[in-house]
Amino acid sequence: MSVTLNTYPYGKTKAVTLSYDDGRIYDRQLVELCNRYGMKATFHLNSGFFGREGYITGEEVGKLYEGHEVSVHTLTHPFLNRVPRERVCEEIRQDRVNLERAVNYPVKGMSYPFGAYDDEVLRLLRAQGIVYSRTTLATNSFDLPKDFLQWHPTCHHNHNLLETAQRFLEISRYLTMPLLYVWGHSYEFPRDNNWNVMEDFFRLVSGREEVWFASNMDIYRYVQAQRNLEFSMDCSSVYNPSAISVWIGVEDKAVEIKPNQVCRL
């Protein structure tokens, strides 16, 4: 029997996720575009800047980002590898507290301000309950991360986005679980006068039957649940100890393994 771990939810073979930083007022327009095209995004927010000129307010966070993910970007956007450990912890902890009050769910994802981190920052993130964090080091590839605390995106939206998306769509179905991860800042669209690039991208990828449109946390939780599946030695049965369904390939067909279920294959 051929059993493979190569399937996203509902048997989809590819995934797209978006990641936007800082919580600028242009997030409002980006969210509207995402909603129009059925895209899901993660918004990494500096809650210490809420209400400042050019930034969203704390009061609008829950409603504005409904259906998307809110994530940590620290309280005040410092270089985390250039401040004392105590401040690293406070920047993350207080941003989590503020965001969780705004959205009423645990906030455990993050992106690094300026893309800056080191081994000590990684250690402190774990202690603060962060389970993934995005860097700014684009890979131009579609691989899932080996370490979610050093999650490198595919590309910035200003760097050949449409060409990269076309290449992604043309990937063979036999490449294991390709992920297109796009990042940026919403203020860059009016600055560079290129909102059309994002809308053209959404038109290109939205509605594709083979693509799962997910937040960063959706991707993290699904991959972790998949990695935690427990198979019998001959792969004739599998137990899913997680709280979400996971799909696997069995003889080239997608099979759903429901939460807390043993499935005979």
Image (cartoon, rainbow, N blue to C red):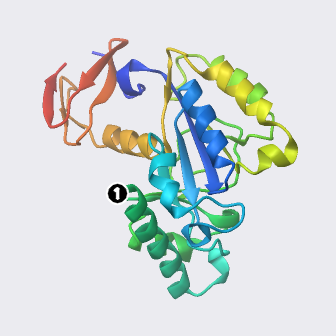
Element type at mark 1: loop
Question: What residue lies at 67% left-to-right and 75% top-to-bottom?
Answer: 79
Residue type, numbered disc 1: Asn
Q: Quadrant of residue 127?
A: bottom left
Relative vertical location of residue 65 with respect to residue 231 in this rendering, above or below? below
Q: x, y (%) of residue 106?
A: 35, 58
The residue at the point 62 percent across, 57 percent down is 23
Q: Count the marks: how many?
A: 1
Asked if residue 236 lies left or right of residue 180, the reply is: left
For the question of whether residue 53 can be seen, the reply is: yes
**Is residue 178 in sight in this rendering?**
no
In this view, 86 is above or below 218: below
Residue bearing mark 1: 104
Residue sitting nearer the eye, 32 or 20: 32
Residue 11 pos. (x, y %): 39, 19
Q: Residue at x 61, y 67 (%)?
A: 51
Image quadrant in which the C terminus is located: top left
Q: Nearer the viewer, residue 164 or 143?
A: 164
- State which quarter of the image contains the N terminus: top left
Left or right: residue 11 compared with residue 180:
left
On the image, the x and y values in percent for residue 53 come to 71, 65
Q: Is residue 54 left or right of residue 179?
A: right
Front-most of residues 196 and 51: 51
Point out the residue furthest to the right here. Answer: 192
Would you place residue 180 above or below residue 63 in this image?
A: above
Q: Position of residue 233 (x, y in %)?
A: 20, 32
